[in-house]
Image (spheres, rainbow, N blue to C red):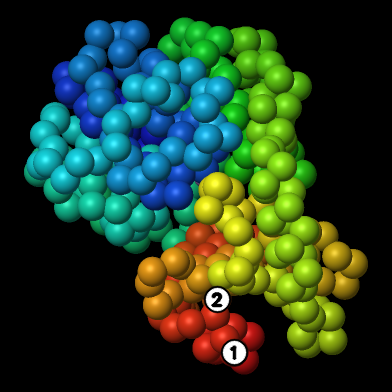
Amino acid sequence: MRINGQEAFEHILKASSLILTTHINPDGDALGSMLALYGVMTDVGKSVRMIIDDELPAMYRFLPDIDKIEKFNHNSLQADLLVILDVGEATRTGAVFTNFSGVSLNIDHHLSNREFADWVHVDETASATGLILQRMFQSAAVNVKADTATCLFTAIATDCGFFRYANTDAETLATASILANQGANPHWIAERIDEKPVSKVIALAAVLNTLEFVSNGTIAAISVTPDIRTADVEDTESFIDHPRSIIGVELAMMFKPQIGKNTVKVSFRSKTVDVSRFAASFGGGGHARAAGCTVKGDLIEVKKLVLD
Ligand SMILES: [Mn+2]
């Protein structure tokens, strides 16, 4: 059932025990939103656990309380309420959703949201799930501490490319200002997000060597071929920003074969076309300007299929 933000927050406040989760391959919005809600709810005395069915990317280690996140261990999960943040469909939680017996609430901003939870508060106009949470905190007059502001600022800033993507609107900027007032340090957060190990720069150079164009240069594709060492490079997602930035390119794609599986992860970024519908036609989803899917086959097969 679709509910509004106030109703969603009331459900959270009514529960005495909460499990928070988010999507596999967690990004800044996923982790920042989960940690912000964790901070606010533990402050009011609730029993709160954070569980993700995946590893945590090292680049977000600076986020307060990130060490409290548990990796899903396939035990069945129980709490008054499962809050699923920044997730548009159940399988994106890994096996967390299916192993939880109880009532679930989904707070999200994905255009492709499938409304799988008992209660769903989805606002696809919000630039980040962190923005939706900050709206709830503000309207409930929650005292947002500096650590929580840092988590929310990271959530919002990373989902809008540090206020450069098409989803950056007046509310996004106004909210960032409020969070800066509440103790988030934009420069410090940007430095933490931007710094990277040398292995990542070397992997990026190799990936950019695979750059190719189709459709008269309006589509640019890069591939994370298996020979490119990315074992210690967890976040290759940002590599797609390079082909996307090329003059004349309307649609950027990145192909990444998944080791040990006969599947390829495909990411899409666009300047004007709706790629969420395109990704959905391959069983994926996302946002209008940023989406992705996982397609069966090897790199050559999947590239041909998608580019055709
Ligand atoms: Mn998000």
Foreground residue, 43 or 141?
A: 43
Secondary structure beneath dot 1 equals helix
Tell me the crowding category of disc 1: few under 14, some 14 to 19, or many 20 or more residues within 10 angstroms, Cα based.
few
The quarter holding residue 74 reads top left
Image location of residue 276, percent across then percent down: 54, 67
Check residue 304 in the rendering and tell me which mark sits there, or answer none: 1
Tell me the crowding category of disc 2: few under 14, some 14 to 19, or many 20 or more residues within 10 angstroms, Cα based.
some
Tell me the residue at 61%/69% (across/down). Answer: 227
When the figure is inspected, residue 19 is found, relative to residue 103, above or below; the finding is above
When the figure is inspected, residue 132 is found, relative to residue 277, above or below; the finding is above
Is residue 170 found left or right of 133 in the rendered image?
right
Marks 1/2: CA–CA distance: 15 Å
Secondary structure beneath dot 2 equals helix
Foreground residue, 216 or 181?
A: 216
Foreground residue, 158 or 287?
A: 158
When the figure is inspected, residue 234 is found, relative to residue 305, above or below; the finding is above
Which image quarter is the C terminus in? bottom right
Residue pointed to by mark 2:
278
Tell me the residue at 60%/59% (across/down). Answer: 229
- Residue 80 visible, this orientation: yes
Q: Is mark 1 within 8 Å of ligand 1?
A: no
- Look at label 1 and name its amino acid: Lys
Tell me the residue at 45%/62% (across/down). Answer: 112
Is residue 305 found left or right of 26 in the rendered image?
right
Looking at marks 1 and 2 on the same chain, the residue that comes earlier in the sequence is marked by 2
Tell me the residue at 48%/82% (across/down). Answer: 298
- Look at label 2 and name its amino acid: Phe
When the figure is inspected, residue 216 is found, relative to residue 116, above or below; the finding is below
The quarter holding residue 69 reads top left
Image location of residue 12, percent across then percent down: 27, 26
